[in-house]
Amino acid sequence: MQRITILGATGSIGVSTLDVLARHPGQYQVYALSAHSRVAELAAQCRKYRPQRAVVGTPEAAAELARLVGDLGIDVAYGEAALCEIASSPDTDTVMAAIVGAAGLAPSLAAANAGKKILLANKEALVMSGQLFMDAVREHKATLLPIDSEHNAIFQSLPGDYARTPARSGVAKILLTASGGPFLNRAVETLEEVTPLEACKHPNWSMGRKISVDSATMMNKGLEVIEAHWLFGAPAELIEVVIHPQSVIHSMVSYVDGSVLAQLGNPDMRTPIAHALAYPERIESGVAQLDLTTMGALQFHKPDYERFPCLALAFDALRAGGTAPALLNAANEIAVEAFLNERIGFRDIDRVVRRVMDENPHGAAHDIAAVMAQDAHARSAASNIVANIARH
Ligand code: NDP
Ligand code: MG
């Protein structure tokens, strides 16, 4: 019986994870669930999955949750320390890290420091603190399995001994596919007028609002380049972004002998979730088998960095190193939130991120305190820029 903590249980990844778990009663046991403010949703999950512990964002939310599930004997808590506790408790084996944004860093890291099996969806944690995170995984013998569909595909396409001998495995390129999001073919001049609703309408995937906007700007792919760099120890030059609008191939690895290995599937996150949960075995995920004969043409082309400046900004941050990716990530989180609240326009997102990166020096990422200080500084710089250009 694998005992599981789901951080961010009420989100898109959290719900998909619970859906896969429900298909395998007797194999997995939910130890703890967390949400931030959607208390009613978390209460319903608690009733169905009966965790021992549940964590929310505030004392008010905890009081409300305790009122709703008080009869179940669940230990209810709130705040970051409680998240770290459910991620590192000796009573859990596996942690699904599916909180969105920098808020996921501390609990994901706590799971690494406790040597857990970590299913990592929260890419922002790795973007912010890649070296420190990977060091913690190695030092404490944690197991890190990628949930992000591209990284899960790359993981499946790499040789089994890659982690032990990356230099000798004959990998020529990591080909990170990108759908290009909802604005791949929209006239560039009209991107200024895009609404949050349009930006959140992804052609192939159903996801939370922040990552949906990141997909529309392609910052998501930029964050994924940085994520791939850390997960697979790959320099920026080894990672190539390929636009593939159908999202059938979820990424590829090409080898020095000319072979290209890919992972294909219907665009449904339950596939990588089931893969990581059962690894190295396989379990059913509820996702329909791919029918290639009804698929039509699969297309591939190079990304347009003028249409998607966020992609170039992320490559810049990766090459700059140190706390530059944390700067990029924090500025992006503030800009995306301002866009979702209709305070700034869609194209202002890349302008805010660029200005924060140009106007604020980055430093060395010695420790988590340095990363968090950079994060806080970038948030305040980005908020000031937003306040100056905001519509309200
Ligand atoms: P959602 O917005 O759907 O869910 C986010 C979850 O995190 C919710 O449970 C939310 O709680 C919780 N949360 C939000 N803010 C905080 C906070 N400040 N502190 C603690 N918990 C918080 O996001 P997704 O599920 O789409 O994405 C989660 C992560 O997975 C992201 O890092 C994303 O990049 C990554 N990912 C997602 C994919 C997808 O298909 N959705 C694909 C690949 C990666 P509440 O519901 O109460 O607000
Ligand atoms: Mg992805």
Image (tube, rainbow, N blue to C red):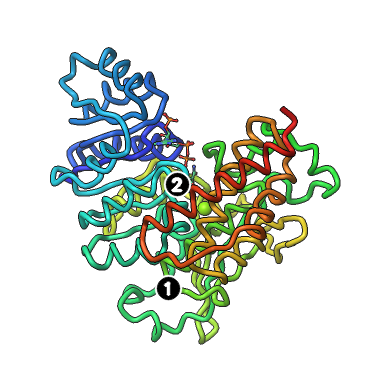
Q: Is mark 2 within 8 Å of ligand 1?
A: no
- Label 1 neighbourhood size at 10 Å, few (<14), some (14-19), many (20+)? some
The x and y percentages for residue 83 are 29, 39
Residue at the spot of label 2 = 102
Q: Depth check: give the residue in front, 165 or 113.
A: 113
Query: Of the residues under marks 2 and 1, which one precedes in the sequence?
Result: 2
Q: Residue at x 65, y 52 (%)?
A: 353
Vertical placement of residue 223 versus 349, above or below: below
Q: Nearer the viewer, residue 210 or 365?
A: 365
- Circle 1: residue type: Gly
Helix, strand or loop under label 1: loop
Residue under the point 18% across and 30% down: 52
The image quarter containing residue 365 is bottom left
Looking at the rendering, in which quadrant would you find the N terminus? Answer: top left
User: What secondary structure is marked by label 2?
Assistant: helix
Residue 233's tag is 1
Query: Residue drawn 73% across and 51% down?
Result: 184
- Pointers 2 and 1 in contact (C-beta within 8 Å): no
In the drawing, does residue 28 fall left or right of residue 335?
Answer: left
Residue 301, position in %: x, y? 71, 65
Q: Quadrant of the C terminus?
A: top right
* Alpha carbon distance from label 2 to label 1: 22 Å
Compared to residue 303, the image places residue 235 above or below, namely below
Where's residue 58, x and y in %? 35, 26
Task: Give the quadrant of residue 206.
Answer: top right
